[in-house]
Amino acid sequence: MERSTGMVKMLMKNSNDPHLAWMLLKRTLDSSDTSSICCSAPRIIPILVRAGMFSEINALRDHLLRLPVPQYKLLYSIVRVLASEGHIHKAMSHFQYFRAQSPHTPPISLYNLLIKASIKENCTDFMSWLYKDMTISKVRLETYTFNLLITALCDCGLLEYAREVFDKMREKGCESNEYSFGILIRGYCRLGFGCKALELLDLMRRTAVTPNMVIYNTLISFFCKKGDNDEAERLVEMMKDDDLTPNIVTFNSRISALCKTGKILEASRIFTDMQVDEVLGLPKPNSITYNLMLDGFCREGLLEEAEALVQSMKRDRFFSTLNSYNTWLRGMVRNGKLLKAEMILEEMADIGVEPNIYSYNILIDGLCKHGMLVDARRIVALMKSCGCFPDVATYSTMLQGYCRKGKSAEANIILSEMIRSGCLPNSYTCNILLCSLWREGKTEEAERLLQKMNGGEGLDMVSCNTVIDGLCRSGKVDKAVEIVGEMWNHGSAALGNLGNSYIGLVNEHRKKCLPDLITYSTVINGLCRDGLLEEAKSMFVEMLRRKIYPDSTIYDIFVHHLCKRNKISAAFQVLKDMEKKGCDKTLRTYNCLISGLGRNNQIFEMFGLIDEMKERGLSPNVYTYNIVLHSLCEGDKSDEAAFVLDEMLQRGITPNITSFKLLIKTFCRTGEFRPAQDVFETAISICGHKEILYSLIFNELTAGGEILLAKQLFEAVLSRNFELSNFHYKDLVNALCKNGDLESAHEILRKMLQSECKFDPAAFMPVIEELDKQGNKHEVNELTERMLEIGSEVNGEDKVPRKMMGLSHGKKGSDWQSVVHRDDGSGMAMKTMKRVQKGWGYGNLSLSHLSQN
């Protein structure tokens, strides 16, 4: 006994030197003194594990098994220490080895520990094996064991198995408690099975297991998020029936769920009720409640309400915490109020609330997203001066800002600065730069970065998919397909040198990256884009064989490319398979199909699909309507196209410039210039005074022979100082001269000079030729001199200031002038459209009605 005690003292004395401690223990092992081994081994096992001396642990294990009486307690101690220190794979390896060597039944506490460690490391296979082993060993299971298993299965989304284990508890002699029910209810709620969670609550109450506050709060939060406030209210009443009083967590759960789903008014009503708790007996709002409401107001852009709440919080001393300031700061950045956000940062410093790294990162992220990179650098310098040093998130945000603007050289400087500061980039940081390099076509730089990444944290699945996407975009889809095939065997190593030669350079112990749904979607899209549809189908079949199941996105890729190649019937066949696999049609699915039908001028079928969209609760967007408009306009069906525009406005879908361009061109092509003008007026009231709209209608009017209208519009355009390169003003001057209206042509030239707009001096030629025919030599010479003077200015030969050619005749402004210079109100679009509708003789029709005519 004295010898054993002495050995333990020597081991403890040398615990800082694991190798020496191991040498001391080996002497005990060689002596086969069981009592000394039993005293010493428990002391040295943690030392060996923490030192990573796993080969020595294996030797100790083998020695303990060879003893005349195997020391199972010590053997299980090895497993316990390994599992507790996070080495679950090694712990299970030893445990499975013991189970194969001996019929000795391990204690339930060891199983519990291993299950708990497996949950932490997300090792579902181990949990399944442990449960089977417990069943075979006939270990008497505890309720705690079952609760661990149910937790693991719920976390993995295997609710059916979790319920099966839950139901077997009574069969195995264990009673389910409130925690058993709570775990399963939380699992159901997390995956959206609210009805099953309620059924479990009813079962709980029938079996006399009283639900606790956590269970009710979980259910209430779920139904609030779902928008079922009636059910949430019913659960609150049930709480009272179970002698539970809704607490602040209950109300905060409801407010949080409502705010996240955009139901800020409902959340605000509950918040107001809580503030008058003396009357209603409700819990008073705490700092979490206030911050939830503040975040909710900011999410919805209700900045006045948010400002009022902040003032209220300051009065009630709820606005002195860093969390409150960060919420307010985040809200301002989210709404683009960057100057206000900087003022909040200054205010924090003034009142003694020291901003943390998260505070600075919020503002830096906002500045980078708005392209204000110089200001972002200034904030980085400020944070450094305040003793708060940039972290990985700061540098990654800056890096992304530069990459977003295509400044990969500056991004590389940020990366170098990051490394110099001792802040090592992670995979996310490198993937930002990697993506930017591939997008810019800098493949050699991208490959060099891949080499560096492999030397650091290693490549992850995002890196792999970024490279595969880059290859597909750069026309190397065959190489992408080759790499995907290699990834199944070699993981991220398949990226090396974009071929097999690099595989050997990659550390075999790195995490293996296997192709996922994004990988296959990327490659299939690349193959389809290159017209290799059969190869794309083969990749799809391989994906299914690998048990990677398709989603709506991958089906949309096939539908899009088939429709693009006018294979409409094949696209609808894909649609059938999509429905069989349980994938819902998306807005993109419908838009692809409608576009394909539009190319074949199948108008009736297009409207049929739009009606189907509405029935399924999918709202057509501006792109959907533009496809329809394009098809109608191609067929010169201007009346139907005008109605579709009206339908868009009535449904609150704002037309874009493309929508208006289609209609204006169609009306002008069919000679309906007055409706074209009406559409133009609607367009500028919605899209603003865009040069593209003005040049379009002016050129169409000029080409259509509406010279007077074109002249009036052009006179109004000159006052807006548009760039004239897209206006066919020479055609206008030439047409006026041909029509014998030399005075008007001359007047246009004078106004062009007065406007100081740059224009081609060749516009003078038709006027000069007409004046020459009439024998007006003096005016011919004057105009020729002015034309040469302007020509020299354009070519940079002479910087003589332009002289005005006299005043215009001072004619009264045209209708176009009033259109161009009016200050459009928010309701102008609808007012104009109603006038257009009345002028075109339309009643209140629907798209489905139109499709039938």
Image: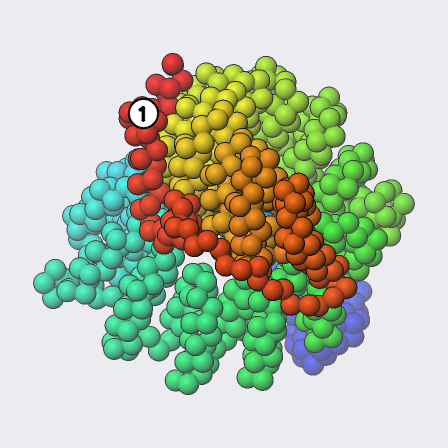
- Residue at the limit of the structure toward the left, as seen here: 279
Query: How does the figure colour the protein chain or chains?
Result: rainbow
Residue 61 x/y as whole percent: 72, 56
Out of 456 and 201, give the one closest to the viewer.
456
Residue for point 48% across, 38% down: 708
402 with respect to 636 (left or right): right
Quarter of the image for residue 4 reads bottom right
Residue for point 37% across, 60% down: 298
Out of 160 and 326, give the one closest to the viewer.
326
Out of 511 and 493, give the one closest to the viewer.
493
555 with respect to 354 (left or right): right
- Which amino acid type corresponds to the residue marked 1 in the rendered image? Tyr
687 with respect to 310 (left or right): right
Q: In this rendering, does residue 106 appear at all? A: no
| Residue at mark 1 | 842
Residue for point 56% across, 37% down: 740
